[in-house]
Amino acid sequence: MSYPTRMREYADQLSRIATSLAIANNEVVYGDITSSQPLDRVGLFTEGNLDKRTDKLNDQMELFDDNFVELTDLIARYIREVPLAAYDTGNSDADRFVRWLPTVVDLTPEQRDLTLVVRSRFAVEEIGRRNRLGHVRFQELVSLNDRLVSELASNPGLRIHLNPIRARAIFETGLLIGEDDLPKGGIEVLFYAFQTEVRTVILEPEGRALVQTLSDIVGPSSLARLKKQLDLTIPLDDESLMEMLTDCSELGLIAFS
């Protein structure tokens, strides 16, 4: 047997063993165990790992408790059917779980909103991991907001930065926001990073236009350029724009330099 063939077979063996152990399909690996090792150790290993994974998912799905009576059984089924992916974190496993859910059950609109929270939070964390330097730099700028926001009207050289670590979502129901009468098509929620946490905010149309305009402008924007761009979509008087920028700076959505 050639060397490349042996290496392929070895790689296939490792993949089969890892996948089987990840879902406690213990019998598959019994033939790979040396005769000097007791088979019951495989069960101890897999059950311990499955218990840890179950506990982690149950903790992360606590938000679902009042709206998902079959959640415990679904988590158990997911863990038995879907191996933990290589390099998965606890949060990435939760994201995969809520994406798996609609493939096995019909979710209510309220349940879809709950899964959207998990997916959006994970999306923000992933963006933050990929753009760690951008996140750190923006948080440094945010720390100066209290001082620099007062210069908005008098310093034409001031630049406005949009938080780069954010994700947009549309809630179908008012379950999570305490509102019954939502606009047709749902309500937009913005998830974004602030220091080490993920925050959410529901913006008015003017706020959504501000975020979209800053997003469309490549790099930081001067106040004059921002106002000119905003006037094309949702004109604002100077007082309203200053008030909105102040509010967004307090939320940690924008920063200045």
Image: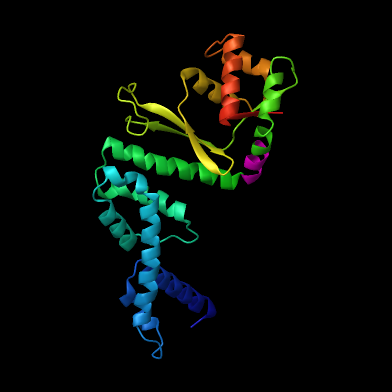
Horizontal side, residue 201 vs residue 81: left or right: right
Does 130 appear above or below 255?
below
In this view, the residue in front, 130 or 56, is 56
- Magenta residue check for 152: no
Q: Most extreme residue toward the top, as rendered?
A: 237
Q: Most extreme residue toward the bottom, as rendered?
A: 36
Q: Residue at x 33, y 75 (%)?
A: 26
Residue 242 position in % (x across, y down): 61, 16
Horizontal side, residue 34 vs residue 245: left or right: left
Q: Tell me where residue 25 sits by quadrant.
A: bottom left
In this view, the residue in front, 91 or 146, is 146
Does 247 appear above or below 142?
above
Residue 11 position in % (x across, y down): 48, 72
Q: Residue at x 58, y 8 (%)?
A: 237
Does 63 appear above or below 90?
above
Horizontal side, residue 188 vs residue 196: left or right: left
Q: Quadrant of the C terminus?
A: top right
Q: Residue at x 69, y 20 (%)?
A: 150
- Magenta residue check for 133: yes
| Residues drawn in magenta | 132-138
Residue 30 position in % (x across, y down): 35, 81
Residue 58 position in % (x across, y down): 35, 54
Q: How many marks?
A: 0
Q: How is the image coloured?
A: rainbow
Horizontal side, residue 41 vs residue 86: left or right: left
Any part of residue 220 in sight: no
Does 245 appear above or below 165?
above
In this view, the residue in front, 73 or 33, is 73
Secondary structure mostly taken by the magenta-highlighted segment of the chain? helix
Q: Residue at x 55, y 25 (%)?
A: 211
